[in-house]
Amino acid sequence: MTTVERALAAALYAESDADLDTGASLLAADPSADAELALRGQELIGRAWERGWQPADVVRMVRRELAEPHVRLAVELVLVQLKRYERLPARWAEQAEGLADAVQSAGDRSEDRFTRATLVLELYRLLLRLPAIEPVGPLPGTPVHLPPVHGEPKALTRIRALLAKAEATEFPDEAEALSAKAQELMALHSIDEAVLAAGGHRGDAPGACRIGVDAPYETSKAILLDAVASANHCRAVWNGEFGFSTVVGFEADLEAVELLYTSLLVQGTAAMTRAEAAQRAGGRKRTKTFRQSFLLAYANRLGDLLSATARQVESTASTALLPVLATRAVAVAGRAEEMFPRTVRTRVRGATDAAGWQDGTTAANRAHHGPGRPGLPG
């Protein structure tokens, strides 16, 4: 039995810190075992791919369960594994690029051999225990299933630019107007894609992607993501245990959901911070209940507003397009049911802070409509 085999046998199924220390000590004392240890890590990452995990999912799980040094090791393993493939699915390539940037910004860190061995064994133990989850796209190395590479549609480029400006500006009125315009373009872009698919008889089928839903206040964030997904002809299924939602829909709509959810979350968090500061300036000290109520109201109100916008935009479409939209909705629902035949409803704790609820509702109205735009009845 090799040093690595003895170390893994001692540590991966360890019931105590002493067993982990034993494995780390064996590895620390034998530098010749490093290559075999790295190979075992690649095998574990490959197994994670086969079980439905993608690069961002793995790193997110490591960050939730372990510490930043483990995250850095996980990113290194993932990037080495991905270099084996000549071409990656689009979402994998985007995730790899983001992880590479994170590694570069982290800088070099050095640990003694025992500390590093301990970190590696703790990481491997987590990777070994990752369960199978629903796959949301092709694995690397299966080019037959990869779509052709095209440039980003001009509509998405414009939407991305509008939302970036909305997040960056220090003027709330400007942010509101930019976000409102972006949301209108998203709805129109979805209709355009449906028209192209129907007219060109493309064999489009619903796909899926995973979007991280991180603590704190993850329930409110999951509700917000569900609202954005529903308004953009998608279905979202939240997995609270692993910190993500799986969104099912056609590719153009999935891209819109990712963009809009991320932007609205950024804007909502900024609005919450400003409102909380005003509350504390007035003498309030209970901020947790305020934040929970704010984000819950923000998510619920935006759900109503986004759905209303989608209905309004679709009402301007020709009657000939309505069967196309209905067919796509049935396809998305069928794909979601196929992926998640057993889902349960989650009981959400109600808002307990009236000021937080009111401020969150106001922030949702402003984020959606912008100045001078008509609202829905309260």
Image: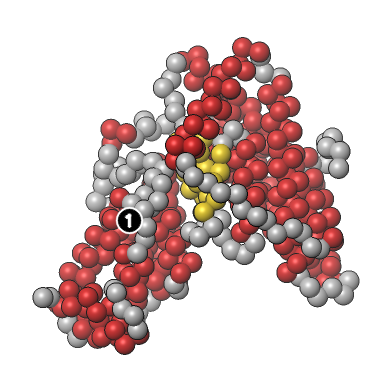
Residue 105 lies left or right of residue 299; in this view the side is: left
Residue 115 found in image quarter: bottom left
User: What residue is shown at x 30% (from left), y 45% (from top)?
Assistant: 140
Q: Position of residue 78 (x, y in %)?
A: 33, 58
Element carrying mark 1 = helix
Left-right relation of 308 to 247: right
Label 1 is placed on what type of residue? Answer: Ala
Give how far across and how far down residue 284 sits, in percent: 84, 73
Front residue of this view, candidates 248 and 146: 248
Residue visible at 64% across and 61% down? 217
Q: Position of residue 144 (x, y in %)?
A: 28, 32
Q: Position of residue 318 (x, y in %)?
A: 66, 14
Residue drawn at (87%, 75%) of the image: 283
Q: Residue furthest right?
A: 282
On the question of residue 177 being in view, the answer is: no
Nearer-the-camera pick, 94 or 115:
115
Residue 5 visible in the shown view? yes
Query: Picture quarter containing residue 145?
Result: top left
Question: How many dots with numbers?
Answer: 1
Residue extending furthest toward the top: 320
Q: How many residues crowd around disc 1 within 10 Å: few (fewer than 14), some, or many (20 or more)? A: many
Q: Quadrant of the C terminus?
A: top right
Which residue is rendered at x = 49% and y = 37% of the image? 337
Q: Which residue is mark 1?
A: 48
Relative to 249, say whether 50 is above or below.
below
Instruction: Give the quarter of the figure containing the N terminus.
Output: bottom left
